[in-house]
Amino acid sequence: MSPAQGMSFFSSLFILVFCTNFKPGRPGRILVPGPPLGSRWRLVNKVATELSRAGHDVTMLVPEGTEDNIRDIENFSLLLTSHPEAVRYYKERLNKRVSLAPNAVSFLPEDLYSALSYVVDHAKLYGLLASECEATFQQGLLNGSRFDLVLSDLLSPCAVILARHLHVPVVSVARGTPGGYDLAAAGAPTPAACVPQLGLALTDGMSLVQRLENFVVQLVTSALTGSMLLRPFDDIARKRTGLSIRDLLAGTDLWLRHTDPMFETPRPRMPNMVYIGGISASPAEPLTQELEEALARVRGENIAVVTFGSMVDQFDAHLAEVLSTALSRLPFKVVWR
């Protein structure tokens, strides 16, 4: 993490702690709901770890059977929901092989199919997240509990419902959401003329036809997001708080955006948005002996280091072969970690 990113991160933590109205001398009580699976959880886990080290009381609200995935946080409490079906699906989804699936709807352009399938693919996941959210209320896990803040990844909008139920502020850690409902809730403009939708191979320099394509995808994904993903949470929100899920999302107190303006299309940023890109990066370490020897053999040549992190274990054989072939055609030496 660069010094600027570090300053941004710690300033966001200061705002996070300040906005909860903690009394001097008393640690804050922070609720962190969500299944502790996947790369999204690592972001929330990182922020929760820093808050725990600062002396605050962190309580994890997770499905029973996933608590072993909570690491690094030294002092925390556990609240376990009972939802075996959701846990099974989370683990199956996490272990799903990444492949180059063909376009199942051949009459759709590849970019359009990619953007729409991204939303449709999340439909079952959001249905289970919603049922898990309702189970939290039915099981009375939060009855009599007192918290000062809810911290969550926005993959599950349940966090904003819990925060409203507990009458406390909510802080969302997000990289992006299907259909971009996080940006819509925050009030951040995403004009179709210059901000490409997720899944489209477009830049901010679009032609008229590309702008029309981007506009259509924006309308369709927004409609699908509301009807397929947010609808189950909307029913719970109205039942438990009397407000719609979009109203609750719009009331998020602080947005921690896991990205960097350098990698995003230029767009307006809301006052309660803080960029924390690079927070999950590990400190620099000396090169391994194997990598040093590999670099020594190609000294004086251009080198590219390619890494896919934890995702590489989920690549199927075909995708791995395609990537290897493509990398071999680059006009310099490639080190694939």
Image (cartoon, helix red, strand yellow):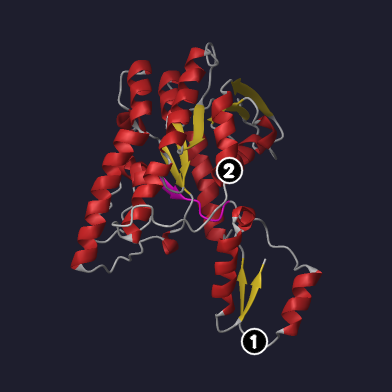
Quadrant containing the C terminus in the rendered view: bottom right
Vertical comparison of 233 with 259: above or below: above
Whether residue 271 is visible here, answered yes or no, is no
- Report the disc number at residue 140: none
Q: Which residue is mark 2?
A: 94
Q: Closer to the camera, 219 or 247?
A: 219
Nearest the viewer among 298 and 278 is 298
Give the SS element for disc 1.
loop
Give x and y (percent) for residue 282.
Answer: 66, 56
Furthest residue in direction right, as rendered: 289
| x and y percentages locating residue 35 in the rendered image | 56, 33
The magenta segment is 273-279
* Residue mark closest to the camera, 1 vs 2: 2
- Numbered tag placed on residue 301 in the rendering: 1
Residue lying furthest bottom in this view? 300
Closer to the N terminus: mark 1 or mark 2?
Answer: 2
**Which amino acid type corresponds to the residue marked 1 in the rendered image?**
Glu
Residue 192 image position (x, y, % from top left): 24, 56
